[in-house]
Image (cartoon, rainbow, N blue to C red):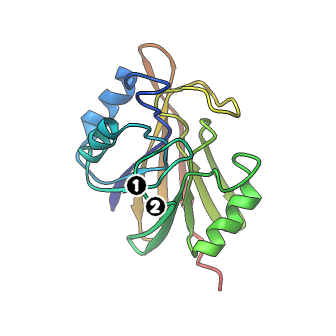
Amino acid sequence: MVTLLVVSDAHIPDRAFELPPEIEELIESRRPFPIVIYAGDFTGYNFFEKVRSWGRQLVAVSGNMDYLDLPEKQVISVEGIRIGVIHGDQVYPRGCIPKLTRVARRMGVQVLVSGHTHAPFIEVHGGVIHLNPGSMTGVPSGGGGSLVPSAMIVEVSSGLLEVELYEVPEEGKLVLSRRERLPLAPLEA
């Protein structure tokens, strides 16, 4: 079993100055993670370095607000599961699951991590598991967003994902808002 920290859209320092302490404490209590996945919009090199310190491996992509030299997409294999990472600005409207499913199929992945919406979701569509951790800081996006800071911790084992979505709906309160056990479909030819 491999534990992933899945986060996105902090926008530090342009829209937020720091992480909410509840999100930071969650991360600090579980680090170092074997793998940290970041789905874009660091917007600052210092915060990129901080995120890199949270795990042994950082898998990160460039967001539409980033100036860092990062790839647009990445694919990794964890416990035999192919996981793709994009920011999500590749599809319109933001977070369109059928369009994200097409992206996942082109990438040849069973799981697609994306950001850009600033609102978390866990969806299964066309055999693809979609994970969007929302915004770590809860800042608004061009499309709105949930305005609630959030992060995901994902346990990956052969053929199964266990996803925990943590949110900070009010200052001083970290809640496990959703827990899902998701079996993986085989890759389609």
| Residue at 33% in and 29% down | 24
Q: Is residue 20 above or below residue 52?
A: above
Amino acid carrying label 1: it is Asp
Amino acid carrying label 2: it is Pro
Nearer-the-camera pick, 108 or 63? 63
Separation of residues labelled 1 and 2 (CA atoms): 7 Å
Measuring from the top left, give residue 136's x and y in whole percent.
46, 33
Q: Is residue 124 above or below residue 105?
A: above
| Residue at 43% in and 51% down | 154
| Residue at 49% in and 49% down | 39
Res 69 label? 1
**Mark 2 burial class by Cα count in 10 Å: few <14, some 14-19, many 20+:** some
* Quarter of the rendering occupied by the N terminus: bottom left
Nearer-the-camera pick, 37 or 22? 37
Q: Is residue 73 above or below residue 140?
A: below
Measuring from the top left, give residue 112's x and y in whole percent.
57, 60
Q: Determine whether, in the image, residue 91 is placed left or right of residue 165.
A: right
User: Which quadrant of the figure has residue 16?
Assistant: top left
Measuring from the top left, give residue 90's x and y in whole percent.
66, 56
Measuring from the top left, give residue 18's x and y in whole percent.
37, 23
| Residue at 65% in and 86% down | 189
Mark toward the viewer: 1 or 2: 1
User: Which quadrant of the figure has residue 7?
Assistant: top left
Nearer-the-camera pick, 187 or 93? 93
Q: Given contact means CB atoms under 8 Å apart, are the residues at marks 1 and 2 in contact?
A: no
Nearer-the-camera pick, 87 or 4? 87
Res 176 label? none
Q: Determine whether, in the image, residue 29 is placed left or right of residue 180.
A: left
Q: Determine whether, in the image, residue 26 is placed left or right of residue 177.
A: left
Residue designated by label 2: 71
